Image: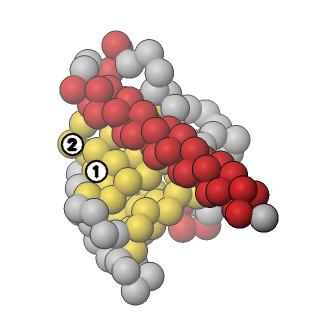
Amino acid sequence: MPSITKSRLAVAATMLAVTAGLAGAAGGALAASALQPASSSRYLRAGGAISGDGVIAHHHGLVSVTRVRAGVYCVRTELSDVRRAIALGTARPWGRVVTTLTTPHSECDNRQDTIRVTVADHNRAAVDGDFTIALP
């Protein structure tokens, strides 16, 4: 029985390492595209660094950001439809949680080209905060 437990631990450790590697690669792709001109981004359909007040610092493929209320943002993209896209969000500074919603939402005028982003603190309360977003 101990060998089965060791096998499961090994599989779990491998899956964790792969997941961490994928998350790091996505963050690296965003960082690389933010430093390059928008036309040179080969692996990022849309992404950027957004401040807590909704100002876009660096971007590729983003049209605008609207702060709906504390901690809730509508990020409009150049893409015509983001419903089937995977949006990756990262909080800056660490310790906050970013959730992204690519389906049309009433707070974002039910637009198909817009991603709803929520930034929350450790108590799950929506708070204004800087974040990055990427659509690989």
Mark 2 surroundings: few (<14), some (14-19) or many (≥20) residues within 10 A: few
Look at label 2 and name its amino acid. Ala
Query: Residue at the location (35% across, 64% down)?
Result: 67
Q: Residues within 10 Å of mark 1 (few under 14, many from 20)?
A: many
Name the residue located 50 percent from the left edge and 45 percent from the top edge: 17
Q: Nearer the viewer, residue 110 or 19?
A: 19
The x and y percentages for residue 53 are: 23, 62
Q: Earlier in the sequence, mark 1 or mark 2?
A: 1
Q: Is residue 34 left or right of residue 47?
A: left
As drawn, the residue found furthest toward the front would be 2
Q: Which residue is mark 1?
A: 50
Please give the name of the residue rendered at 41% of the width and 46% of the height, measured from the top-left corner: 133
Is 96 situated above or below 90?
Answer: below
Q: How many marks?
A: 2
Residue for point 65% across, 49% down: 11
User: Could you tell me residue 68's position as x and y percent?
Assistant: 41, 68
Residue receiving disc 2: 57
